[in-house]
Image (cartoon, grey):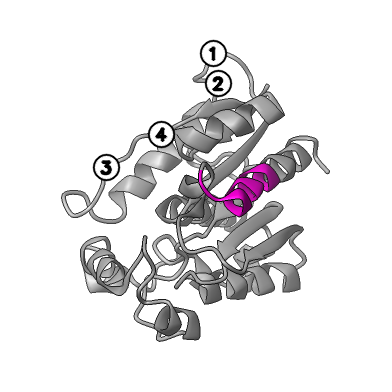
């Protein structure tokens, strides 16, 4: 049985129907009441439980998915799992913890938030008035989610800054983003690094779409096309292609 972890109900129903996968929709604590890393830790715990059989049946393949902040959590989860594996390998393969588990079989990231810093990238400057993610909202997130400034160099909160050694171990990763999204440059940069590290997958840029376009599928045909493309990518990952 295949399993899809994370996402929003609106498009997840379409993806579940297309793939036959069981959807796990984790709820997690949010900032400012619960800054990083509480939410990420909770999502990782859900993932580990799913892999351990908490659904009542064995899962053959698991794909993690997330859009915007969910994309941040999905990529951060993979980073943390790989880092756990590396720690075990440095001890000669002897694990002192039952918490190390298998990586996802793929990842689908929709307009992900990958770098929580103040980098004045061209897309951030040009699209600061994005209808879903304007500069004011980005500013608020960067102030309240980290909790403290010394975590901004942590690849759990900013997955894009992870080193190539970890990136090389990523599962097949598919990314889609809007061409007028302030996070466009971060997504493109992350995709370039993944492909240079030999990771399979694809990047799709929808030139005329802003941030958060999954939620616009009912009113914008091109956004509906993006959700359909997500179904196709998921089928590819679940089939091991």
Q: Which residue is mark 3?
A: 29
Task: Give the x, y percent position of residue 37.
Answer: 31, 53
Q: Nearer the viewer, residue 92 or 72?
A: 72
Q: Nearer the viewer, residue 176 or 59?
A: 176
Task: Give the x, y percent position of residue 153.
Answer: 38, 73
Q: State whether residue 45 is above or below residue 165.
A: above
Question: Sequence order check: which comes first, mark 2 or mark 4?
Answer: 4
Q: Distance from label 1 to label 3 (Cα)?
A: 25 Å
Q: Nearer the viewer, residue 44 or 203?
A: 203
Q: Nearer the viewer, mark 2 or mark 3?
A: 3
User: Could you tell me which quadrant the C terminus lies in?
Assistant: top right
User: Could you tell me which quadrant the N terminus lies in?
Assistant: top right
Secondary structure at numbered mark 3: loop
Q: Which residue is mark 2?
A: 53
Q: Distance from label 2 to label 3 (Cα)?
A: 23 Å
Q: Which residue is mark 1?
A: 56
Residues under numbered marks 1 and 2 in contact, where contact means CB atoms less than 8 Å apart = yes
Q: Over which residues does the magenta segment extend? A: 219-230
Q: Which residue is mark 4?
A: 26
Q: Is residue 233 magenta?
A: no
Q: Is residue 182 visible?
A: yes
């Amino acid at each position: 049985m295949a399993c899809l972890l994370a996402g929003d109900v609106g498009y997840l129903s379409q993806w579940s129907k297309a793939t036959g996968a069981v959807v796990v929709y984790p709820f997690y604590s949010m900032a400012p009441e619960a800054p990083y890393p509480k939410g990420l830790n909770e999502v990782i715990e859900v993932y580990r439980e799913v892999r351990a059989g908490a659904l009542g049946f064995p899962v053959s393949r698991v794909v993690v998915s997330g859009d915007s902040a969910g994309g941040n959590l999905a990529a951060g989860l993979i980073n943390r799992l790989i880092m756990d594996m590396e720690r075990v390998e440095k001890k000669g393969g002897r694990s002192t913890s039952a918490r190390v588990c298998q990586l996802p079989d793929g990842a689908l990231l929709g307009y992900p938030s990958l770098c929580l810093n103040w980098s004045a990238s061209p897309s951030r400057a040009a699209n600061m008035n994005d209808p879903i993610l304007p500069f004011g909202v980005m500013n608020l997130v960067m102030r309240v989610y980290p909790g403290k400034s010394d975590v901004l160099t942590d690849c759990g909160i900013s997955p894009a800054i992870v080193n190539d050694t970890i990136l090389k171990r990523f599962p097949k990763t598919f990314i889609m983003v809007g061409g007028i999204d302030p996070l466009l440059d971060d997504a493109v940069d992350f995709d370039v690094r993944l492909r240079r590290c030999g990771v399979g997958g694809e990047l799709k840029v929808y030139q005329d779409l802003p941030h958060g376009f999954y939620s616009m599928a009912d009113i914008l045909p091109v956004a509906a096309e993006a959700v359909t493309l997500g179904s196709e990518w998921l089928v590819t990952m679940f089939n091991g292609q």
